[in-house]
Amino acid sequence: MAEKTVSAESGSTFKTLRNLWPYMWPADRGDLRARVVWATVLLVVAKLTLVAGPYFFKWATDALAGDAKSVPPLPAFLLAPVMLVIAYNVVRLVQLGFNQLRDALFARVGQYAVRQLAFRTFIHMHQLSLRFHLERRTGGLSRIIERGTKGIETIVRFTVLNTLPTILEFALTAGIFAVTYGWKYVAVVAVTVWLYIWFTIRASDWRIVIRRDMNDSDTDASTKAIDSLLNFETVKYFNNESMEAERFDRSMARYEAAATRIWTSLGWLNFGQGVIFGLGTVIVMCLSALEVQAGTQTVGDFVFINAMLIQLSVPLNFIGFIYREIRQGLTDIEQMFDLLDVPQEIVDKPGAKPLVVGAGKVEFRDVHFSYDPNRKILKGISFEVPAGKTVAIVGPSGAGKSTISRLLFRFYDIQGGKILIDGQDIRDVTQESLRAAIGMVPQDTVLFNDTIAYNIRYGRVDASEEDVRKAAELAQIGPFIERLPDGYRSMVGERGLKLSGGEKQRVAIARTILKAPPILMLDEATSALDSHTEQEIQAALDLVSKGRTTIVIAHRLSTVISADEIIVLQDGQIAERGTHAALMRKAGLYASMWDRQREATEAEERLRIARERDEFGVVVRRRPSEVS
């Protein structure tokens, strides 16, 4: 990937800061705006107090040196050198108090910005299309958002409360030097500051490239770790722990190298900054020493100039820190803002109305669709699911069966034709109302890492405990839950791994029962289960689908015998359609698929019987292998 040009970097920086501004200065939160204003006022007052402090130090030094004429007329109690020293430290304490009060005022503003931007990103992720999420790695996305939210507070804090007051301090210092000591002091300080800032920016830009490489390595390592742990069982099945560890270690090695370069470059940056400021200080102090010897300055002036330079070194160091932190923060949230810039692929039409579901009739009318322009998935299919009836979609793998469920939920928009519910084109209604009208029991049920009750209640979040229990009973999982030590409060584990496949499917069915949708989609809901569990789950599914418009995407044909119509897809087109009996009489593709599945089922049954006989001590003779 080619590196960005300087102009591109600047444009990206200003764009990011412009995007951040509404969170730093929220239009609908007058209280937060007031906090920003008062925090800024306090910081400006603190800077003015800080600049005034060295004057007390100067007057105390002159008084101790016997140069009383250099001390301005002050109240009598302040004229004693000891009191001037005390006043100097009191001023510093007051300045410190203003800074702490500023931080306390601004804390809520920074956290509000973090929360709002993180919330907006989270919402936006849910609004993006299924295509986007299938093409991105979950581990990488979570890492980008995590780093981005951490970088937001840094950027918000430093851009608002530090940059402008630091510029003010430079201006005050330069003004004092110009009026009191002459422009040659201002010139030396200005050149020193300019060189310091120039060096800091150049070195920080160099470190940003390293930081980006470190972030990429960190994201890659996190993605590999999450992907491997989510597929824990698969790793164990194939005994590939060592391979997974090596892949993770390679990513961490790249991260280690980049992180080492970051720390090394920081050392060089700090050394260069010290050299530049040290040389500037030496020149200014030599000028002052010469003038003290010439009698044009007092010892107090010499001490005052040194104190001002020491104070100036703090914001100078802070400017370097601010720039580094802002640039690093911008790097960290750059990808997060890129996510926010990803447009929604599926959006409601302007003025889209809620879907009005009457009888619940579903119709696919000459539907064309492809994920990739070079490979068409559905080629003009048309079928109708009458209200309250069940239509099954079957066919070989890759025929486009599961695509139908995704299109009905409008996870993708079709390229041609129409999908209608009670005569309403699903592109003309709101997505929220569309998806509220459809219930889904998928093949691979993924549960949230929460309680069983939470996962069932996900079908209707305002459901009562009694409603949850009734749904569980109807899904034939109630007795199982009651036997658990924690009952409905039992945790299901990551992705529901503490439950068996059949138990997860029953939870999914209970969730759908609770939702009570007029239209039901069963996407190969029993294909991953054994025959015995399949029969139990099928009974629960029959109960759920009773009286509802139901579309069944099926792999096992035995589950759709009773469907009102069976549609056979092949290569994105409808090859056959009819009832089970009619399709068997036709002796076409469906009948061929039925025969193959029946043979496979019979072979599985014979194998099961053989295993049972072997278990009870009956020797099962096996023919010797013909292949040596």
Image: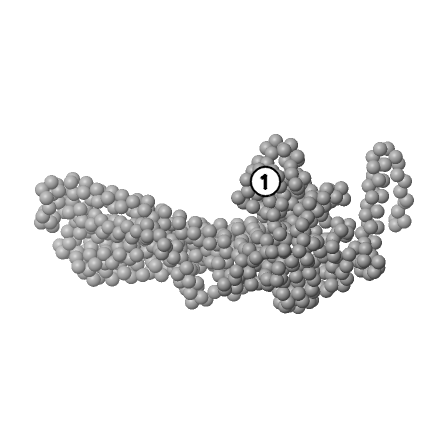
Question: Where does residue 438 sit, x and y in percent of width and height?
Answer: 61, 53
Which residue: 10% across, 44% down?
75
Residue at 23% x, 54% y is 285
Disc 1, SS: helix
- Tell me the crowding category of disc 1: few under 14, some 14 to 19, or many 20 or more residues within 10 angstroms, Cα based: many
How far across and how far down the image is residue 377, in percent? Answer: 68, 64
- Which is nearer the eye, 272 or 481? 481
Structure colour scheme: one colour
Quarter location, residue 176: bottom left
Please state, as top left, top right, bottom left or bottom right, where the N terminus lies in the image.
Answer: bottom right
Q: Can residue 26 be seen in this view?
A: yes
Q: Nearer the viewer, residue 104 or 445?
A: 445
Q: Can residue 451 be seen in this view?
A: no
- The residue under the point 39% across, 59% down is 17
Lateral position of residue 181 relative to residue 424, left or right: left
| Residue 367 occupies quadrant | bottom right
Query: Is 384 left, or right, of 163 in this rendering?
Result: right
Kind of residue sitting beneath label 1? Val
- Residue 507: x and y, percent? 63, 42
Position of residue 175 measured from the top left corner of the image (x, y, whole percent): 21, 59
Q: Residue furthest front?
A: 358
User: Residue placed at 50% from the left, 52% from the top?
Assistant: 122
Count of number-bearing discs: 1
Left or right of 303 on screen, residue 243: right
> Circle 1 is placed at which residue position?
468
